[in-house]
Amino acid sequence: MPLVYDYKVRDQQGQLVEGALEGDSIDLIARRLREMGYLPVSVKARAKRGFKWNGNIQIPGLTRIKTSELAVATRQLASMVDSGLSLVRALDVMVSQVENTQLAAIFREVQTDVGRGLALHQALSRHPKVFDNLYVSMVQAGEAGGTLDMVLVQLATLLEKKAAIIRRVRSAMTYPAVVATVMIVIFLAMITFIVPIFKKIFASLGGAKLPLPTRIVLKISSILLSPWALLVLAVIIVAILIFLRWKRTLSGRRAWDGFKLKFPVFGPLMHKVAISRFSSSFASLLASGVPMLQSLDMTAEASGNQAVADVLIEAKEAVRQGRSIAEPFARHDDIIPNLVTQMVEVGERAGSLDTMLLKVAEFYDQEVEETVNSLSSLLEPMLTVIMGLMVGVMVVSLYLPMFDYVKHVPTS
C-alpha cells in the first residue's frame, strides 16, 4: 500500500522546496524528485496512527565518497573542460555520469552555485569534507592561470596515486588483522567453553598435581570467567577512549605520529607513505602555480602525519626568511630522508623543484609497493605459525594430565 512521504528539495536556483508525494518506497520518491529536476535533501515517511517521526531518513544510495571515485570524476571533468564545454554544462553532465549518489548531489550543488556566479573553487570550498584545501587551492590556481583543465588532470593523477597507496596499505594490514582476530576468537572460545570442561574432568581424576602448563591455562580461564574480567574490560575500554581523545590533541597527534614512523615492521611502511604523499602533493601544488608558502601550508595539512607536517611548517618559516627548504629538512633527517633533502636542494638550485619532487614521489611509490609485497610474504607464514603454536600449546596443556593419568592406571 502506497505511503505519503514528506520531502525537502532544492530547485535549479538552489531554493528550498517542501512538499509531499505518495509512493511505495523512499528510493522511488527520491528517484521521482530527481527526474523532476530537484535535488533531494531529505525524505521521510509521514507518521501513521498518531505516531510522529521527527528524524530525517537518509536516502538510500548515499554512501561515503571514495578517493578513487573522486579521482575518476575529476578526470572526467578535466576531459569535458578541455573539450570546450562550459563549466556549468560540464558539471551538469557530471551529475548524470557519477554513479555515487552523494557525489552526484554535491556536483549538482556545485553546478547551481557556479550558475549563480560563484567561481568553481568557491563552490567546491562549500563541501570541505569532499574537496579539501589542497583540491580547492589547486583549482583556484588553475582558474587564475587559465589552466583549469591541466590542473584537474594533475588533481586526478594525485588522487589516483593516493587511492593506490591506500589500497596497498590496506592490503598489507588486512591479512594480519584478520589472522589476529581469528586468533583472539579461537583463544577466547577455548578458554570459555573447552577449558571448563577439562577442568571438571581433572577434578574427577583426583587430587593429583597438574603440570605447570595446565595450571597456567586453568588460571587464565578462571580469571577471564570471573567477575573481575568485566572490570578489566571496562578499564581497557576507558583507556582506549582516553587514548583516542588524547590522539586528537596537537601534542598527542605529534607524539603518536612520530611513534608510528618508528614502529617495528609497519613503521617503515608508514614513513614511506608519508613521504610519498608529501612529495606528490607539494609537486602538484607548485606545478599548478600555487605560491610556495601556500603550497607548504597545504602540503603540511595533506601530509597525513604531524611529524612531517611540523618539518614542513618549519620549512615555510625558512622560506619566509629567505633561506632554503633543504636547510630545515637536513636538520630532521629522521623524518625527511637524506635522499629527499638532496633532491629538494638540487631542485631549488635548478629551478625545477616540482619535477624533482615528482621523481621523489615516484621513487617512494615503488618503495611502498615493494615494502607491501615484502610484508605480505613475511607476515603470512609467520602469523600462520604463531596461530598454530597457540592452538598447539593450548591442546597439549589440556591433554598433559590425561597422559600422566594413563601412565598410572594399573594394567590387569
Image: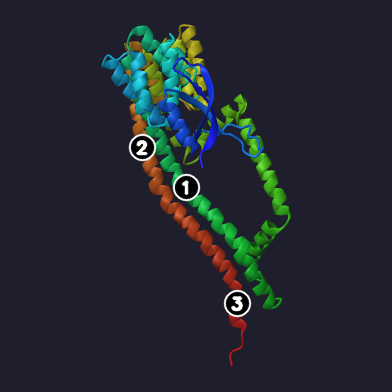
Q: Depth check: give the residue in front, 197 or 358.
A: 197
C-alpha separation, residue under disc 3 versus residue under disc 1: 37 Å
| Image location of residue 145, percent across then percent down | 35, 7
Q: Nearer the viewer, mark 3 or mark 2?
A: 2
Q: Which residue position holds label 1?
A: 176
Within 10 Å of disc 2 (Cα), the crowding (few <14, some 14-19, many 20+) is some
Please state the total of marks drawn on the protein image.
3
Viewer-side residue, 396 vs 197: 197
The residue singled out by tag 2 in the image is: 369
Residue 390 locus on image (x, y percent): 53, 59
Between the residue at mark 3 and the residue at mark 2, the CA separation in whole angstroms equals 52 Å
Q: Are marks 3 and 1 in contact (CB under 8 Å)?
A: no
For residue 192, above or below residue 232: below
Query: What is the quadrant of the C terminus in the image?
Result: bottom right
Badge 2 or badge 1: first in the primary sequence: 1
Q: Amino acid at mark 1?
A: Pro
Residue located 66% across and 43% down the image: 237
Tell me, what colour scheme is on the image? rainbow
Q: Is residue 61 visible?
A: no
Q: Position of residue 147 (x, y in %)?
A: 32, 11
The local crowd at label 1, few if under 14, some if 14 to 19, many if 20 or more residues have their Cα within 10 Å, is some
Type of amino acid at the residue the image marks with label 2? Glu
Decide which of tag 3 and tag 2 comes sooner along the chain. Answer: 2
Label 3: how many Cα within 10 Å (few below 14, some 14–19, many 20+): few
Residue that numbered label 3 is attached to: 404
Give SS at disc 2: helix
- 327, above or below 209, in the image: above
* Residue 3 makes an appearance in the image: yes
The answer to whether residue 45 is left or right of residue 209 is left
